[in-house]
Amino acid sequence: MASLVQSRRNLLTALCGGAAIIWLAARRGAGSEGAFQVPEVSVPQAKALLDAGAMIIDVRDQAAFSYRHLPTAVLVPLVLLRAGVPAWLAATKSMPLVVYCNHGLSHGPEATHLLQAAGFTQVANLASGIEGWVEAGLPIQTA
């Protein structure tokens, strides 16, 4: 019985590990299209967009948002976007929108993809996330 459990555990580990490798390869563009090929903006581009009136969406969780976030950012966790775009946000489809997460590598691109699929035409992921923003010495807020 113990060997059956171990065999199943080994199979699950191999499958999960393989899925992670495939996902990472796709994200890096190795051999196939990336998982979420979305428009991205640099920190200076994001700052210019925000200065011009773009909305900024933080897709991290409440704890991360409370710890620190970009000024004027609105919290819309990725978990919420996966369930559907809130009506108040859907009403802003025509305005420029910058999405960010921690490093701009997973949650931000996925959220940007979901918003594009929902009809947002001027949405972009902050390529370096909040970490890049902080590294550039730009202001942050805490809740």
Image (cartoon, rainbow, N blue to C red):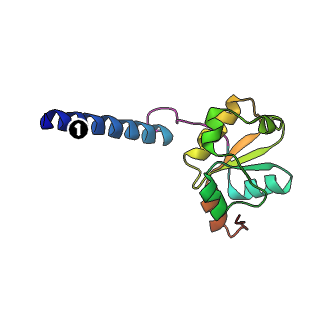
Task: State the quadrant of the C terminus.
Answer: bottom right
In the image, the segment drawn in magenta is: 30-39
Front position in the image: 34 or 81:
81
**Which residue appears farthest toward the bottom when viewing the image?**
137
On screen, residue 46 versus residue 37, left or right, reads right
Q: Residues within 10 Å of mark 1 (few under 14, many from 20)?
A: few
Above or below residue 12? Residue 76 is: below
On screen, residue 9 versus residue 69, left or right, reads left
Residue depicted at 29% across the width and 35% down the height: 12
Q: How many marks?
A: 1
Q: Is residue 83 magenta?
A: no
The quadrant in which residue 20 appears is top left
Task: State the quadrant of the N terminus.
Answer: top left
**Amino acid residing under circle 1:** Asn
Residue depicted at 44% across the width and 34% down the height: 31
**Which residue appears farthest toward the front when viewing the image?**
1
On screen, residue 91 versus residue 15, left or right, reads right
Q: What residue sits right under mark 1 in the picture?
A: 10
Label 1: which secondary element: helix
Q: Position of residue 125 (x, y in %)?
A: 66, 46
Q: Position of residue 55 (x, y in %)?
A: 79, 48
Q: Position of residue 64 (x, y in %)?
A: 60, 58
Above or below residue 1? Residue 71 is: below
Residue depicted at 65% across the width and 34% down the height: 114
**Of helix, strand and loop, which mostly describes the magenta segment?**
loop
Residue depicted at 29% across the width and 39% down the height: 13
Q: Position of residue 137 (x, y in %)?
A: 68, 70
The quadrant in which residue 84 appears is top right
